[in-house]
C-alpha cells in the first residue's frame, strides 16, 4: 500500500529544511508556555496575589484557552487569503503573545492593588487568543506540509530536538544561571528571562513562516477546495465519528496533564531542592538527559517511518512507564535521597541518573509524535467524509487537551494548600516533611505514570497504524485522480500536485 501511495501523482513532500524550520513554530509558542510557567512566582512574590487565587486563575485561563480553540479553528477553515490560510495567524499570534507578556510581567505590579487581579485576568485572556492563533497552525498545517506516511514522522525529530533543548536547556538556564544571578524570582529575573524568550520566539516564527510559504496554498488543501462549508454544529458529529481523534485526545491529554504538572516551577523545587537537597541539580540533570533523549527520539522516528506512528508511540509509552515505576521503587527504598549528587557518583546517583534519563527520554519521544498523529486523524476525516477541516480537527484536539491539562496548576495548588502552603509556595530552603516527600514523588513520578497508563489503554482503540494510513492516502489520491479525469482539478507537471 505504501508503494502505491509513492507512485501516484498526488504525494506531497517537503524539503528537509522546510520541515525543520516549520517545527520552530511549535518551539516559538513553547517558549511562551515555558515563560508563563513562572507566572505563579511573579504573581505571588511580586504582584502580591495569593497562591490559591493564582492557581484558580491559571486553571480558568486554561479552560478559556480550550473554549477559544474551536472558534479559531472554525475561522482558520474559513480563511483563504493571498497570504495563505495559516501564515497570517502565525504572525498575528506571535505579535499578540509578545505584547501580552510585556504588559503582564512589567506592568501588573505597578497597577493599584485593587485592580491587579482584573488586570492579570484581562491580559491573560488576550495572551490566550494569541497563543491559540499560533499553536492551532502547528497542528493544522501539518496536512499541507506533507502527506507522505514515511516523511510525516520527520517533523517529530526536529520538534523533539528543539523542545529538548528548550525545556532542558531552559531549566538549566533558569536554575543554574538566572536564579543565582538575580537572587531568586525577582523583577530582574523576569525582565531578562522574558526578553530572551520574546526575541527568540519572534525569530523562530519568521523562519516557520518562510518554511510554509510554498505549501500554504489552495492546491494543497484536501481535494483542492478553497474553503469548506462548516458551522459550529459540525463539531459534535466530527468528535462522535472520528474514533482515532477521540483516542489520541485521551492519550495525549493525560500525558500533557503530567507534563504540565512537572513544569510547574514549584515541582522541581520540591523534588530537587527539598527532597534531594540540591535545586541546581535539576538543571544539570536536565542537561544530561539531552543527548539520550535525542538519540531515543531519532531512533523512534526511524522506527515510525517503517512501523508507523502508533507502534512507536505505544513502545515509547511502555519505556517511560517501566522506567518511572522503577524510579518510584528506588525512592521508596533509598535511605537518604540527599545521597544523590554529581559530586558523589555512588550507586544511588548512578541508578537515579539511568532511570530518570530513560523515563524522560521516552517521554520526549511520545510527546513529539503527537503532532503528526493529529495530521493523521485529519486525513482520516477527509478520507471518510471528503471534507478538509484541519483547523477543526486541530482545535478539537487542543480544546479537550487544554481542558484536561488545565487541572495541573489547580492540582498542585490545592494539594499544597492541604499540607499548609496556602499563601506561599515551598522554597528550596523549606524543611522536608512527610507531606512534601509524598507530594514531591506524586507530582514528579506518580502523575506521569497515571498518564501513561491512560495512554496505553487509549491506544488499544486507535486504529491508524502504518498500513491503514497508507490505505487512506492511496484512496484519497484515487479520488483526486478521478477529479482530474473529470477536469475538476488540474495537475502541475513540475510538482505532481493538484493546482487551482
Image: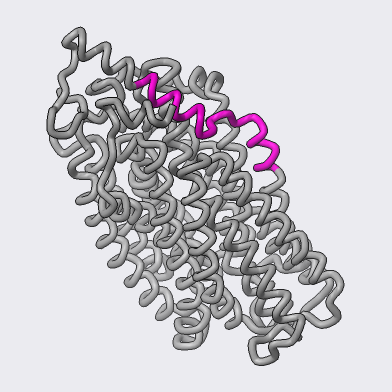
Q: Is residue 434 left or right of residue 379?
A: right
In magenta stretch: residue 284? no
Q: Is residue 391 left or right of residue 40?
A: left
Q: Is residue 488 left or right of residue 298?
A: left
**Residue at x 43% of width, y 62% of height:** 161
Residue 430, quarter of picture:
bottom right
Q: What is the magenta range?
A: 454-476
On screen, 449 above or below 498? below
**In the rendering, at what x and y percent does residue 476 appear?**
36, 21
**Residue at x 54% of width, y 46% of height:** 60
Which one is in front, 178 or 208?
208
**In the rendering, at what x and y percent does residue 122 appear?**
41, 51
In magenta stretch: residue 472? yes
Residue 196, quarter of picture:
bottom left
**Residue at x 50% of width, y 70% of height:** 291
**Residue at x 53% of width, y 41% of height:** 307
Which one is in front, 176 or 370?
370
On screen, 119 above or below 494? below
Q: Residue 100: tell me if it is visible.
A: yes
Which quadrant does the N terminus fall into? top left
Residue farthest bottom in this picture: 343
Q: What's the coloring here?
A: one colour
On screen, 297 above or below 68? below
Which one is in front, 267 or 361?
361
Which quadrant does the C terminus fall into? top left
On screen, 279 above or below 43? below
Q: Residue 95: tell me if it is visible.
A: no
Amino acid at each position: 500500500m505504501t508503494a502505491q501511495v509513492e507512485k501516484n501523482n498526488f504525494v506531497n513532500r517537503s524539503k528537509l529544511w522546510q520541515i525543520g524550520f516549520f517545527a520552530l513554530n511549535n518551539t516559538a509558542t513553547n517558549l511562551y508556555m515555558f515563560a508563563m510557567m513562572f507566572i505563579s512566582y511573579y504573581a505571588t512574590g511580586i504582584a502580591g496575589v495569593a497562591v490559591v487565587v493564582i492557581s484558580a486563575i491559571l486553571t480558568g485561563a486554561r479552560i478559556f484557552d480550550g473554549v477559544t480553540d474551536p472558534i479559531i479553528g472554525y475561522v482558520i477553515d474559513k480563511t483563504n487569503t493571498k497570504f495563505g490560510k495559516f501564515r497570517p495567524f502565525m504572525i498575528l499570534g506571535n505579535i499578540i503573545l509578545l505584547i501580552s507578556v510585556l504588559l503582564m510581567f512589567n506592568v501588573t505590579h505597578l497597577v493599584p492593588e485593587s485592580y491587579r487581579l482584573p488586570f492579570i485576568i484581562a491580559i491573560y485572556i488576550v495572551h490566550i487568543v494569541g497563543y491559540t492563533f499560533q499553536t492551532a497552525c502547528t497542528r493544522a498545517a501539518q496536512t499541507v506540509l506533507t502527506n507522505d506516511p514515511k516523511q510525516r514522522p520527520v517533523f517529530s525529530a526536529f520538534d523533539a530536538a528543539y523542545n529538548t533543548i528548550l525545556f532542558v536547556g531552559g531549566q538549566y538556564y533558569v536554575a543554574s544561571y538566572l536564579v543565582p544571578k538575580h537572587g531568586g524570582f525577582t523583577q530582574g529575573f523576569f525582565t531578562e528571562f522574558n526578553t530572551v524568550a520574546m526575541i527568540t520566539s519572534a525569530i523562530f516564527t519568521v523562519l516557520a513562516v518562510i518554511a510554509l510559504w510554498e505549501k500554504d496554498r489552495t492546491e494543497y488543501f484536501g481535494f483542492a477546495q478553497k474553503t469548506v462549508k462548516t458551522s459550529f454544529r459540525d463539531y459534535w458529529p466530527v468528535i462522535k465519528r472520528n474514533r482515532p481523534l477521540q483516542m489520541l485526545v485521551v492519550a495525549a491529554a493525560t500525558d500533557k496533564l503530567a507534563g504540565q504538572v512537572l513544569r510547574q516551577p514549584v515541582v522541581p523545587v520540591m523534588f530537587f531542592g527539598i527532597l534531594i537537597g540540591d535545586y541546581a541539580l535539576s538543571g544539570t540533570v536536565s542537561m544530561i538527559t539531552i543527548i539520550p533523549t535525542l538519540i531515543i527520539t531519532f531512533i523512534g522516528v526511524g522506527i515510525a517511518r517503517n512501523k508507523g506512528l502508533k507502534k512507536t508511540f505505544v513502545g515509547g509509552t511502555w519505556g517511560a512507564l517501566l522506567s518511572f515505576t522503577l524510579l518510584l521503587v528506588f525512592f521508596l527504598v533509598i535511605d537518604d535521597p540527599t545521597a544523590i549528587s554529581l559530586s558523589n557518583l555512588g550507586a544511588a546517583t548512578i541508578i537515579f541518573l539511568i532511570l530518570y534519563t530513560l523515563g524522560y527520554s521516552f517521554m520526549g519521544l511520545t510527546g513529539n509524535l503527537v503532532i503528526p498523529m493529529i495530521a493523521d486523524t485529519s486525513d482520516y476525516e477527509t478520507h471518510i467524509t471528503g471534507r478538509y477541516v484541519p483547523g477543526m480537527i486541530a482545535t478539537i484536539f487542543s480544546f479537550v487537551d487544554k481542558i484536561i491539562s488545565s487541572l495541573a496548576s489547580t492540582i498542585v495548588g490545592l494539594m499544597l494548600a492541604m499540607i499548609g502552603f496556602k499563601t506561599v509556595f515551598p522554597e528550596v530552603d523549606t524543611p522536608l516533611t512527610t507531606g512534601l516527600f509524598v507530594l514531591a514523588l506524586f507530582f514528579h513520578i506518580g502523575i506521569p505514570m497515571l498518564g501513561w497508563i491512560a495512554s496505553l489503554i487509549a491506544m488499544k482503540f486507535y486504529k491508524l497504524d502504518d498500513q491503514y494510513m497508507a490505505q487512506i492516502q492511496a484512496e484519497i489520491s484515487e479520488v483526486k485522480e478521478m477529479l482530474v479525469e473529470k477536469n475538476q482539478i488540474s495537475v502541475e507537471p513540475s510538482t505532481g500536485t493538484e493546482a487551482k
